[in-house]
């Protein structure tokens, strides 16, 4: 399955896109959580590969990563497990470059492709240093999603949107992931800026915590990514049913005219 073409097709149906984030290896039911959020209306799922120093992530995702590592999760075990998740939407991994470099560009890309993973987000790999991983990913058919921040200059934003595959990840605020009481002021602006320079799907993420915030962020973009608010429910003992119930509220908000 191709990430970008799948998201484009859903967008053309008039649908706002929803991509939940799930930490891979977080408990025995994490694969069931992925299936549950798809059944609840996700258009793709971002699976985080646990890492001991997730610099883009706040307390919730850090705790989830550490818990998964304590349970024995490894990059290879999470990727291999994704091969067993039979869903009809694209799967995307979110990982850090340290792990990619340790595995090797070609081996990492080939492992992802063999597991049926459609895309990858490597937030600490700058656009200017993408070549080694970008070439390997392209050769393997893994679409590399790039991030654009509120401080990204207009000329660089155009370059990022041109090179990004799958979708463009518009970061709503400067800072780490985590729940916020209100939508960041830059969220809607990021959607407008990205949409002005690309026809690729544009999704807004980081700090989107509630159905109302998701709907607001999606007004100027094609959809949203929601991570910490979902992962917190899993850390608090929620399983597939609670994950599906939360994602269903996001779906309903995005579908409300």
Image (tube, rainbow, N blue to C red):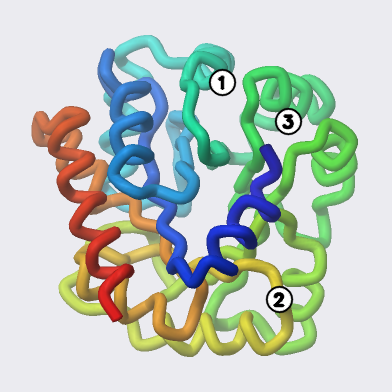
Closer to the eye: label 3 or 2: 2
Q: Would you place residue 32 above or below residue 15 in this image?
A: above
Q: Quadrant of the C terminus?
A: bottom left
Crowd around label 2: few <14 · some 14–19 · many ≥20 (10 Å): few
Q: Nearer the viewer, residue 104 or 53?
A: 104
SS for tag 3? helix
Q: Disc 2 or 1, which lies upstream in sequence?
A: 1
Q: Are marks 3 and 2 in contact (CB under 8 Å)?
A: no
SS for tag 1? helix
User: In 3D space, how far apart are the residues under numbered discs 2 and 1 (Cα atoms)?
Assistant: 30 Å
Crowd around label 3: few <14 · some 14–19 · many ≥20 (10 Å): some
Q: List the residue tagged with mark 1.
A: 79
Q: List the residue tagged with mark 3.
A: 101
Crowd around label 1: few <14 · some 14–19 · many ≥20 (10 Å): many
Q: Image quarter for residue 219? A: bottom left
Q: Quadrant of the N terminus?
A: top right
Q: List the residue tagged with mark 2.
A: 199
**Left or right: residue 171 compared with residue 184:** right
User: In 3D space, how far apart are the residues under numbered discs 3 and 1 (Cα atoms)?
Assistant: 16 Å
Q: Nearer the viewer, residue 166 or 209?
A: 166
Counting from the top left corner in percent of width and height, residue 180 is at 22, 68
Can residue 62 be seen here? The reply is: no
Counting from the top left corner in percent of width and height, residue 54 is at 45, 42
Counting from the top left corner in percent of width and height, residue 110 is at 77, 22
Q: Residue at x 39, y 63 (%)?
A: 206
User: In 3D space, how far apart are the residues under numbered discs 3 and 2 (Cα atoms)?
Assistant: 31 Å
Q: Residue at x 78, y 20 (%)?
A: 107
Say the numbered circle drawn on residue 9: none
């Amino acid at each position: 399955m191709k990430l970008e073409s799948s998201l484009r097709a859903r967008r053309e149906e008039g649908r706002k896109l929803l991509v939940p984030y799930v930490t891979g290896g977080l408990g025995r039911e994490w694969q069931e959580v992925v299936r549950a959020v798809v059944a609840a209306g996700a258009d793709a799922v971002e699976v985080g590969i646990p890492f001991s120093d997730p610099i883009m992530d706040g307390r919730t995702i850090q705790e989830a990563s550490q818990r998964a590592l304590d349970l024995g999760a490894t990059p290879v075990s999470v990727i291999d497990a994704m091969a067993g998740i039979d869903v009809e939407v694209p799967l995307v991994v979110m990982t850090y470059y340290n792990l990619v470099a340790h595995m090797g560009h070609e081996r990492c890309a080939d492992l992802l492709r063999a597991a049926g993973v459609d895309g990858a987000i490597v937030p600490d790999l700058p656009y200017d240093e993408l070549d080694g991983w970008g070439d390997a990913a392209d050769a393997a058919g893994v679409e590399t999603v790039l991030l654009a921040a509120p401080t990204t200059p207009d000329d660089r934003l155009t370059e990022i949107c041109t090179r990004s595959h799958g979708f463009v990840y518009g970061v709503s605020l400067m800072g780490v992931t985590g729940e916020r009481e209100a939508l960041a002021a830059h969220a809607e602006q990021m959607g407008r800026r990205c949409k002005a320079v690309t026809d690729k799907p544009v999704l807004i993420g980081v700090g989107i915590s509630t159905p109302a915030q998701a709907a607001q962020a999606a007004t100027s973009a094609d959809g949203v990514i929601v991570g910490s608010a979902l992962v917190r429910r899993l850390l608090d003992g929620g399983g597939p049913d609670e994950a599906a119930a939360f994602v269903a509220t996001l779906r309903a908000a995005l579908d409300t005219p």
